[in-house]
Image: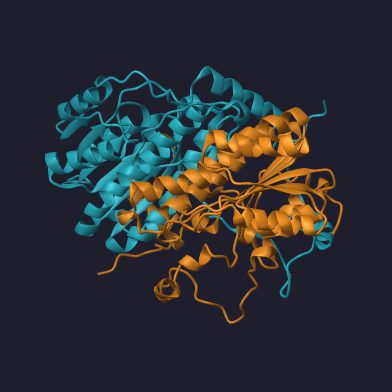
Chain colours: A orange, B cyan
Amino acid sequence: MGDRLKEKVAVVTGAGRGIGRGVALLLASEGAAVVVNDLGASVSGEDASATPAEEVVAEIRAAGGSAVANADSVADFAAAENIVGTAVREFGRIDILINVAGILRDRMVFNLSEDDWDAVIAVHLKGTFNTVRHASRHMREQKGGRIVNFSSTSGLYGNSGQANYGAAKDGVAGLTRVVSRDLGKYGITVNAIAPVARTRMTQTVSDAARQARASRGITAGAPATELRMEAEDVAPMVAYLCTAAAKDINGQFFVVRGGVISLLNYPAPARTITKQGRWTPEEIAALFPSTFGMDLVNPAPARD
Amino acid sequence: MGMLEGKVAVVTGAGRGIGRGVALALAGAGAAVVVNDLGVDLHGQDPSASPAGQVVEEIRAAGGRAVANGDSVSEWATAENLIQTAIREFGRIDIVVTCAGILRDRMIFNMSEDDFGSVLAVHLKGTFNCLRHAAPIMREQRCGRIITFASGSGLFGNPGQANYGAAKSGIGGLTKVAARDLGKYGITVNSICPVAATRMTLTEETLKAREIRKQQGIIREEKALAQLEDLKPEDVAPMVVFLASDDAANVNGQFFLCAGGSISLLSQPRAIKTIFKSDAAWTLDELDETVPLTLAEGLVNPAPARQS
């Protein structure tokens, strides 16, 4: 228990279970009043139930904190406005927005249906836009606020079978970088977390698939020392970004896995070739192997 | 003999600007080209068949093979028809280049649902649609080249472009995943981040905004960006032709920044600073003490709060 977020009001989406639940509990224990948003749906976004959000609210209240449940869908522009509106109605303002809500529909890209694509983009990317857009108006008026979005290493490094999820999560990254610049001058910070944690979402990637990838050298196999990766471990860095101490951390990306927290680079030119005037494709082909191509690795080389 | 002799390509947004340059260069290297363009304005309004038709004329006049197509990439079914046009007209599809895009710039707090949705539909869904419909055919053929268009806007964060930045970064993620899904079938998926003087970049607003940002030191401008007017849209095409060729068979999942005569390979995401506890999560007390001296050390706020 602390008082770093005393008198602050927070909205946490996808807060009924897993990482979002951990974030909601920690923010509340630091004194924030929390709108616990969760549809209570399955990993693929079906079978909604109000129970998970209500259980988290009960847990916060039992510990002496302040919270209300909300079951609106972030994917809907008007419903997302009501999530933000709930914070303002119930607690008078909104200082903190944490976007954790998400679903998964894994398929290889050549089998991915339009619906699998749309549903995942709608919750992660449109959903993050929706809540950020509505919250930003209040935060701009207040001249202060904290937004933490959830991206993923799936998009950053490219997880096979997750074209929809990888696109959505890298989209959230781009949104975060732009919005940090749109809102910074109003005293608002916008950062992103790429979590690695054991939750019901990560259990969808089967052990067989992991082993198949590892055997082809596409991702590393399990190392000798297993790192911690509990869902609750992600919360402290999220809460830290919401405190006064983090007022100048803006537009940044952190990977959090158990007790490991990393700052990610911004993309930048790694190697450059320049000539006066226009290149020809033949010139590029001739120069490529000794310049760009020197240590490029094809992440999935052709099989004969 | 051109580098792409016997290949069949689809280029979206090929009626003007960068897409036009790509279509002409692919045709010049020997590929038959489906020139796709809705012929709309910058915001996606007022369709016209003439830009695509004119590029086809130009290719044919130079002795190349091309057909025009006016389907919208943002619709699943019309995007399928676009890919099928290549099959119907030229018997196969080897190369897909997705340049089609629109702009609706607004600060995030003023951005409408439609501004966000329409930009995402054309760039991100449009790229997915074309890639998705081409992928099963390329998988059967055991070869193919997909070249998507991302943008420095999403990678570096341009103010006023939450929709465009999200869409273009989303294309980045799609590109990386598709590279891994399709690589083993002999298909490569790479991305270009172009910097060029086109009707999308040389608007009065963007030039003014660019100047203000530069004065405030908010964005780190590449030197090349200062002379945006000198960066021709046609300059982007040679790298696309190279990536479409057999020479680039093992270049997969990469991002290239193309600005005039300058081509850069972009770095992949990397952890640059890490703090570690092996046995437990960090506590807030510990983070208060550690983060300012480690992860946050030297970080610059790209848009610091203004004292009001």
Residue A258 percent coordinates (x, y): 67, 67
Left or right of B39? Residue B221 is right
Q: Between residue A302 and residue B279, name the one nearer to us.
A: B279
Q: Between residue B85 and residue B113, name the one nearer to us.
A: B113
Quarter of the rendering containing residue A298: bottom left
- Image height of B39 relative to B101, above or below: above
Q: Residue at x 15, y 35 (%)?
A: B65
Q: Residue at x 27, y 35 (%)?
A: B23
Residue B103 percent coordinates (x, y): 46, 27
The answer, for residue B291, to whether it is visible in the render is no
Left or right of A135? Residue B44 is left
Q: Residue at x 77, y 39 (%)?
A: A91
Q: How many marks can you see?
A: 0
Q: Residue at x 37, y 58 (%)?
A: A107
Q: Between residue B187 and residue A255, name the one nearer to us.
A: A255
Q: Between residue B159 and residue A39, name the one nearer to us.
A: A39
